[in-house]
Amino acid sequence: MKRILFAVVLLLSGTSLLRADEGMWLPSEIILKIKDMQEKGFKLTAEDIYSINNSSLKDAVVHFGGGCTGEIISSEGLLITNHHCGYGQIQQHSSVEHDYLTDGFWAMTREQELPNPGLTVSFLDYMEDVTEQVLKGYKPSMTEEQRSALVAKNIKAIEEKAKEGRKSVSVSVKALYYGNQYYLYVFKVFTDVRLVGAPPSSIGKFGGDTDNWMWPRHTGDFSLFRVYAGADNEPAPYSKDNVPYKPKRFFKINAKGIGEGDFTMVYGFPGRTNEYLFSDAVRYTAYTSNPHKIALRTLRLDAQKREMEKDPAVRIKYASKNANVANAWKKWQGEAKGIIKMRAIENKEEFEAAFTKWSQGKPDYENLVARFKELYGAIEELSLVRDYQSEALNAVELVAFAGRGQRGAERFYKDYHMPIDKECFISLYKAYDKNIADKYKSPYFKEQLAKFGTVEAWADAIFTAEPNMEMAAEIYRNTNKWFMENYAPVLDSVNREITLLYRTYMRGMMEYNKANRGTKVFYPDANSTLRVAYGQVKGYSPSDAVYFTPVSSLDGIIQKDNPEIYDYNIPQALRDLHAAKDYGQWEVNGSVPVAFIATNHTTGGNSGSPVLDAEGNLIGVNFDRVWEGTMSDVVYDPEVCRNISLDIRFALFVIDKLANADHLLEEMEILK
Ligand code: ARG
Ligand code: ASP
């Protein structure tokens, strides 16, 4: 009953007015948005985007590894994604003799393409609304426990049925709108995926962490892979006899260019957003969690930086770790700022007050807001304790490594530098000691600190010439056990109740919106499933008196070029091409376009996503967002939220002029 109501509400809200360009839409329900898309310039139909019976754009979009998107760009299984998405693979193949991270890698023949054990590329076969089957047998009289058990049982049956008689598929049912809707996803999974090409990091990661999350941007963030299949064109484990996969569909490349105002669409696998959070959760993020986590990561980054600057070997060891720590560190800052600047908390509180008033006499909804307040209040302190558990106590490399059983020792020590870790131990454990109330600290932590007198002395005992693994492991075991036994159960059970409340709140917000002729847009939070976002190429104003235009070019790379600064030291070959203005067919207005921004709503996981023009041709590869708009995971502001894409013509220029890999260009279909 409730579920039918939900569908109706959803349909109505889908047709209501929308705030510009916010939203990540389900491909199979894109018919609800197609009119708006077409009004904004899109020339194709809903059936072109997603079709069960015919080949459609979706057949060229893949889930790359666990956390990125990629797309097929030739009839022979050629795939493009980001450099930072293929980073792990590029690193795996690198050694001192073949440093592909530094020098880049280009397979000049198919034989030279490099296999990547463990890497998967998944094609969505189909998706299907299975809400009715998942809730089959549900009665409103059931308790939540009974409902969960029923849902789990039904999901298992649905997944098993979908798998029947098929091999190399991955099947999963996922909840949308906090369990108001359920979708089945069936993927075909390829495991023979080979590295074809990657520019040097000085192009693929140009600007490093200095430019990360920022516009203007000049990163050539792409890498190329190829999907291989068995003789029957089906997934097969790696074999040298495998052949390039013949895809149902690949993207044609639009090299004619784009400009401000042009329609764009991003088709990919966004990971996680939380657009319907209660005000207290957003306040916790902006004023408590993010600031603490940022401060803790600043301590780690400082320690890393000091040692990395001293020794080039340490710089290489910590390159990837440093990038990971810095990535979220920088994003959280932009996010907290954006939330505050948008007055997101105050706006939510206003809405919640109006919602409470409206909900009087509606038993499903009338106590929701008060209950949210109680529950969030109850776990505020414990949530911070958990943040410190992962961002401070477990963030010491040796502690986590020893505590988790010293798995992967060779790899661990290859990239380990004890002075950094010791310094982190001292600063992080001091911060923990200072910022976490005594009552939450494990007796073990307090005993050790009392025994050694200072955190420094404690550190001296662990980080000896031969590190004391037993002590490190003991810290991990004891502090995590204390947390798991005393606080995790409370946190988990309250969080479970919060999630259930959101299920009802979601429906309530939609009903409220309809009853009040509201204009709020509803779309399910990102959950690593395939989505469509659309918008237009557009500049923005990050702050007073500043306006950013939306397209960057090679001239900007040259302006930033500085052999003294690691992040900005470009390959000599690129300087030479610039000096000679040797841009070939990729020249535009005396330069080569590099990146552009647009209003598509994206998040982590959208990296590598195809950015398409009005005809569904590839114009770019998504790789980031602008700093002032990183709060879009929680609240979207059409004024400043922009995704950043590599202009596909820069990739073509690099492949052509730097790599001289013409054979790759030849297998693509390039519209000029
Ligand atoms: N900001 C990009 C996204 O969140 C990642 C960029 C990776 N590069 C880096 N310098 N950390 O994932
Ligand atoms: N850089 C992100 C990714 O790797 C994209 C984003 O968060 O906008 O998916």
Image (cartoon, rainbow, N blue to C red):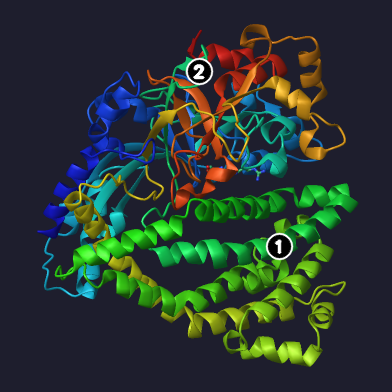
Q: Is residue 494 left or right of residue 330?
A: left
Give the quarter the ligand 1 occupies. top right
In the picture, the disc for residue 193 is none
Q: Is residue 333 above or below residue 237?
A: below
> What amino acid type is highlighted by mark number 1?
Ala
Instruction: Give the CA separation, mark 1 to mark 2.
Output: 49 Å
The local crowd at label 2, few if under 14, some if 14 to 19, many if 20 or more residues have their Cα within 10 Å, is: some
Looking at the image, do the residues carrying marks 1 and 2 touch, with CB atoms under 8 Å apart?
Answer: no
Q: Nearer the viewer, residue 647 or 23?
A: 23
Residue 233, image quadrant: top left
Give the quarter of the figure containing the N terminus: bottom left
Q: Which residue is mark 1?
A: 409
Residue shown at 44% from the left, 30% from the top: 229
Residue shown at 13% from the left, 54% from the top: 5
Residue 12: give x, y in percent of width and height.
18, 43
Residue 196, image quadrant: top right
The local secondary structure at tag 2 comes to loop
Disc with the residue nearer the chain's start (1 vs 2) = 2
> Is residue 239 in view?
no
Residue shown at 31% from the left, 27% from the top: 37
Q: Is residue 10 left or right of residue 322?
A: left
Q: Nearer the viewer, residue 661 or 490?
A: 490
Residue 294: give x, y in percent of width and height.
64, 61
Residue 108, image quadrant: top right
Q: Is residue 374 above or below residue 506?
A: below
> What amino acid type is highlighted by mark number 2?
Ile
In the picture, the disc for residue 258 is 2
Mark whose residue sits in front, 1 or 2:
2
Q: Nearer the viewer, residue 470 or 148?
A: 148
